[in-house]
Image (cartoon, rainbow, N blue to C red):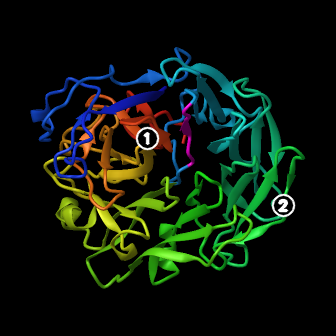
Amino acid sequence: MACKLLFLIGIWLSTSPAWGAPQANFAAPSDTPRSEQKIDLPTVHKVLSSPGIPVHGDDQSMCWYDYQSNGGDEKRLWVLPDGNVYAVWIGKDSEGLQSARTCYAISTDLGNTFDYMESVESHRREMPALAVLPTGQAVVASNYWRSGQPQFTCSVYIEIIAGMGIFTEFPIPHDNHVYVAPQVACLPDGRIFCTAYNATGYNLAVSHQYRILDPLTGSFSEHHDLFPGEQPSFRSCTVSSPSGQKVATVLSDDLQSLEQEDGVRILCMESTDGGVTFGETVALAEYPTDFSQEVFLTTGSAVSAVYDAEENLHVVWDAGPMIMDLKRPVDEYFHDYMMILHDCSTLDNGEPIVAVRHDTARFIHSLTLTNYKLGNFHTPICFPKIGRDEDGILTIVFTAFIGDSTDCDPVTGYANGEIFAVSSADNGLTWGEPTNLTNTPEIDERYAYLSQWNEAGKINILYQSDPVAGANVGVDKEY
């Protein structure tokens, strides 16, 4: 079933000290009665017709790809102070995966209207990441698996002229190794910082890598290792600070590493010289595994990061229960184990702070392991992304599921997702009340991408809206 990729602007109604407290005011794009959602917000006003603005206009021919994220933050939406908005997503037609491409749309009026530029690449590509050069040219990185060949290929695509939608390809050297999920960050001097991640089984001799691309010459720097000796994973985020002096890449251990190690971690490497050299790997969080316990906490579906104006790095990820006792109801563990966490080295001695905690009054409940149908790699609160506005307000957007196990798509049996947001006015020390932005109980909405920069008092998000619930669930017999 074809889905839509939508752009949504949310407007905060208050910048009072109530921000970051349990009662936060947010303008949500719906007239859905709050009593039906059991959310106690003091004032909610409709500011935009749900479910947002289709960035592809009326053309849904490339909207048949319904699994838009592998758990990284590929920064697929950029809003700039000059009013330009850039958006990319994975597109595919109804014929099959060989048609998969990066679709591209641009707006020059802060997202009120979009020009759909169609495909960035001329052949199959997946998992795109987006950045924007100081000249306004879009930069896209994506990977491609060639049938019959032993490796993926990763490339960077640079827009020839800003807003034209025509790109030049620069293949990332792979040194005969397998790399996937490339990401890019544009530095103020025009250089492009590129990362790619090891997908060679559990061959620890192959490290994740980074290179710097000079778009004027088309040449890449030599290979540099990232996270040397660490397990393969591609749930990552690459981000640069406003000055370009700092560059960070964050990695979440693959859940398969549970079989290899005594725990899973959120890892970070940071550069203070514009990506030339990096410090040691730092574990922002560690979750020990103990299979003798009936349940233990582990990392969830995604990781995201942003720098603030003072160039402090803010990282968010979700966590949830690894359940060993399959006979007990899943939601018995939700409140203690299902959460979204925020980390900044300047706060709380660098210890992670809970930004969102699951509660059955707000999010989906009455689940067991037999009716736990949210979509592959989904949990009741998942896929967080973080951004900030020009006043420094931090916001996390995420996919969540409300109601109970009876509120599912009658065709697929999967629950419909909603897009939620939560904000902090004190740099992430405290967080407000999560708010439902979409309020469309009959439509499945997932994979929100939040712009790194947003106008004061606003957030801008790109998300998927699908009339058939589920993600990568085989509904269209395409996966």
Percent coordinates x, y for residue 197 in the rendering: 66, 62
What kind of residue is marked 2? Ser
Q: Which residue is mark 1?
A: 448
Residue 221 got which mark?
Answer: 2
Percent coordinates x, y for residue 290 in the rendering: 35, 83
Instruction: Bin the neighbour count of mark 1 within 10 Å (Cα to Cα): few under 14, some 14-19, many 20 and up.
Output: many
- Of circles 2 and 1, the one toward us is 2
The C terminus - image quarter:
top right
User: Which residue: 21% across, 67% down?
Assistant: 336
Q: Quarter-wise, where is residue 379 in the image?
A: bottom left
Percent coordinates x, y for residue 282 in the rendering: 53, 76
Q: Quarter-wise, where is residue 12 in the image?
A: top left
Q: What secondary structure predominates along the stretch shown in magenta? A: loop
Is residue 83 shown above or below 278? above
User: Which residue: 76% across, 35% down?
Assistant: 123
Q: Quarter-wise, where is residue 404 in the image?
A: top left
Say whether residue 48 is magenta.
no
Q: Residue furthest left?
A: 35
In the rendered structure, which segment of residues is drawn in magenta? 74-81
